Image: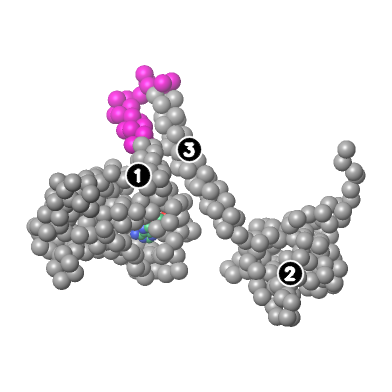
């Protein structure tokens, strides 16, 4: 049977570092796990000020961590713990901090190292919450309009019924896109990609993608989204898998449309680069809010969405660019982003052109016996 234990006994036994501070920020108690984390005896910490042990976290307004004696504490965030090494030097260990108020008495802070596992767990939690939200929104709408049609359909004018059915269809399409994206991402994760190469006329493909995004935008916002396409020379053909290539441009051009004002044109410029081994460069440039430079590498990772007001307003899962990058890489291309916050973003993709040499090599490979290479 469990022995009856006091609060302090429990904190003593905890594997997370624990600190109890008064409201003046002075440490009243530190547990042995915290002593182990910073390399000092826990008993000697009492009387120190919290900020002498924990560095204020970057960009977090937490009254306790900033050494302020009033103001809100931010409940969960990350920061740095000062670690005292054997030679007396001080190093910093990135930690996750969870503060809980102890009524008017003070604050209990639980402190754990911020490991790769924590980051993965966080990414997974974010994913589950993003996906649940993305599914729930269209489902709620489908159910609501279907219920209304079921109960009041007979009294509604035909035009109204048609409007409701269109909404149901649009939301079902949104669910299908979401499921397709999730499946595409999981297939990439398992590195299963069947590519069937052939020459793809680029101008035709870009026009097709632009038209499908324009139709979607028009039904949603009633604004005609403008894509300024230029393909030089117009006859450019890429050496790629048609469906996969289309998916790359859908993701890039759809993002440009989603994350920039509806009345600002999106430019899509393609150029043949003969001096670069027959490559083609396509730049999709918008005039949207842009992306901070330090986040540019992260937008190509799975499930990452930039934290800004657009995240709530704009439908998305954080999978589009991950899929675009994986597909581009698999087809021998490259993709990267440049952005000026407040001015817009430019996404560049470089793909091999369908040169006669490439096609000949491919034909040769197809017809060559296995052991030839
Ligand atoms: P999502 O489904 O969220 O659009 P993506 O993988 O396509 O996922 O993009 C990841 C994130 O990168 C987006 O959530 C957004 O924050 C940012 N992003 C992508 N394209 C643009 C753009 N053209 N302008 C501004 N932000 C962008």
Asked if residue 96 lies left or right of residue 270, the reply is right
Q: Name the residue under label 2.
A: 38
Within 8 Å: ligand 1 and the Cβ of disc 3?
no
Residue at left offset 33%, top offset 33%: 169
Q: Mark 3 points at which residue?
A: 136
Residue at left offset 85%, top offset 66%: 28
The residue sitting at the bottom extreme is 88
Instruction: Specify start and end residues of the magenta stretch as a single range.
Output: 150-173
Quick one: label 1 or label 2, which is nearer the N terminus?
2
Residue 54, horizontal then vertical, whole percent: 70, 70
Asked if residue 140 lies left or right of residue 80, the reply is left
* 12 over 22 or under it: above or below: above
Say which of marks 2 and 3 sits in front.
2
- Magenta stretch: includes residue 113: no
- Magenta stretch: includes residue 163: yes
Res 181 visible: no
Say which of marks 1 and 2 sits in front.
1
Picture quarter containing residue 219? top left
Residue at left offset 66%, top offset 62%: 113
Asked if residue 339 lies left or right of residue 137, the reply is left
Quick one: label 3 or label 1, which is nearer the N terminus?
3
Q: Mark 1 points at which residue?
A: 192
Kind of element beneath mark 1: loop
Res 307 visible: yes
């Amino acid at each position: 049977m469990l022995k009856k234990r006091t609060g302090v006994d429990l904190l003593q036994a905890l594997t997370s570092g624990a600190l109890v501070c008064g409201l003046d920020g002075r440490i009243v108690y530190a547990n042995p796990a915290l002593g182990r984390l910073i390399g000092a005896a826990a008993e000697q910490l009492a009387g120190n000020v919290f900020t002498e042990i924990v560095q204020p976290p970057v960009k977090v307004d937490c009254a306790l961590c900033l050494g302020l004696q009033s103001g809100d504490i931010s409940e969960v965030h990350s920061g740095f713990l000062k670690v005292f090494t054997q030679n007396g030097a001080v190093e910093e260990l990135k930690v996750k901090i969870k503060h809980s108020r102890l009524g008017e008495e003070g604050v209990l802070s639980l402190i754990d190292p911020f490991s790769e596992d924590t980051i993965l767990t966080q990414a997974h939690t974010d994913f589950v919450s993003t996906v649940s939200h993305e599914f729930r929104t269209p489902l709620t709408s489908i159910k609501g309009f279907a219920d209304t049609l079921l109960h009041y359909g007979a009294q509604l004018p035909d035009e109204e019924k048609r409007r409701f059915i269109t909404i149901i269809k649009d939301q079902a399409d949104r669910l299908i896109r979401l499921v397709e994206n999730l499946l595409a991402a999981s297939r990439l994760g398992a590195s299963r990609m069947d590519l069937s190469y052939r020459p793809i006329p680029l101008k035709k493909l870009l026009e097709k993608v632009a038209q499908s995004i324009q139709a979607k935008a028009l039904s949603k916002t009633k604004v005609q989204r403008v894509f300024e396409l230029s393909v030089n020379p117009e006859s450019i053909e890429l050496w790629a898998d048609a469906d996969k290539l289309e998916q790359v441009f859908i993701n890039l051009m759809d993002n440009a449309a989603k994350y920039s004002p509806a009345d600002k044109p999106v430019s899509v410029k393609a150029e043949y680069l003969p001096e670069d081994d027959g490559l083609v460069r396509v730049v999709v440039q918008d005039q949207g809010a842009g992306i901070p430079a330090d986040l540019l590498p992260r937008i190509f990772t799975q499930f990452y969405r930039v934290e800004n007001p657009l995240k709530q307003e704009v439908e998305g899962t954080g999978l589009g660019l991950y899929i675009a990058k994986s597909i581009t890489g698999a087809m021998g291309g490259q993709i990267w982003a440049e952005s000026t916050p407040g001015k817009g973003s430019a996404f560049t993709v470089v793909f091999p052109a369908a040169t006669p040499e490439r096609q000949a090599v491919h034909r040769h490979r197809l017809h060559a016996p296995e052991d030839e290479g």
